[in-house]
Amino acid sequence: MKTIVNLALSVVVREIEDTLETYPYHPYQQAFSIPEVRQRLISYVLSRIPGHYAVIDDPEETAIDTACLYTCTEEKLHIESLIQHGIERILQEDSDWIEHHIPQTVTPGCAASNWFG
């Protein structure tokens, strides 16, 4: 049985992971660790780049070389730009929802004290 595989997907997922590593943990990495939010970002980027597909014989085959898909510096920069724009857009659009799904970080020096009762 032959299966059609979207090769761009693995490239985009890898680039998203690399990009998010450069962002602060809160709220960026926390927000995009939520599967629904990460999926929105993946969809955002994939819908704005050309697709690359392959037909494979074995659906379990994972050793497909995707490194050569977006070798042009301009294409790579375009994907990185889309990821950054998507991150900001999704955080802005879903800020209320995200605030309720990730805990706020508290800076110890700025936290209210109950020492005085």
Image: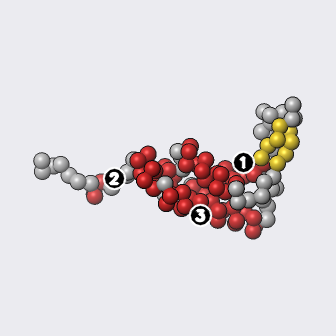
Answer left or right for 6 relative to 113: right
Q: Amino acid at mark 3?
A: His
Q: Nearer the viewer, residue 70 or 2?
A: 2
Q: Nearer the viewer, residue 60 or 108?
A: 60
Location of residue 26 in the rendering, given as x and y in whole percent from the top left corner: 45, 54
Sequence-first tag of 3 and 2: 3
Mark 3 lies on a secondary structure that is helix
Give the number of the mark in front: 2 or 1.
1
**Residue wearing tag 2:** 106
Mark 1 lies on a secondary structure that is helix
**Residue wearing tag 1:** 10
Give the number of the mark in front: 3 or 2.
3
Disc 3 and disc 2: Cα gap in Å?
A: 27 Å
Say which residue appears at 56% left-offset and 58% top-offset. Answer: 87
Answer left or right for 27 relative to 112: right
Sequence-first tag of 3 and 1: 1
Q: Amino acid at mark 1?
A: Ser
Location of residue 69 in the rendering, given as x and y in whole percent from the top left corner: 80, 56
User: Label 2: how many residues lie within 10 Å, few (<14), some (14-19) or many (20+)?
Assistant: few
Question: Does any portion of residue 4 appear in the rendered image?
Answer: yes
Q: Amino acid at mark 2?
A: Val
Question: Does any portion of residue 26 appear in the rendered image?
Answer: no
**Which mark is drawn over residue 85?**
3
Answer left or right for 41 relative to 66: left
Sequence-first tag of 2 and 1: 1
**Which mark is drawn over residue 58?**
none
Locate the N terminus by quadrant: top right
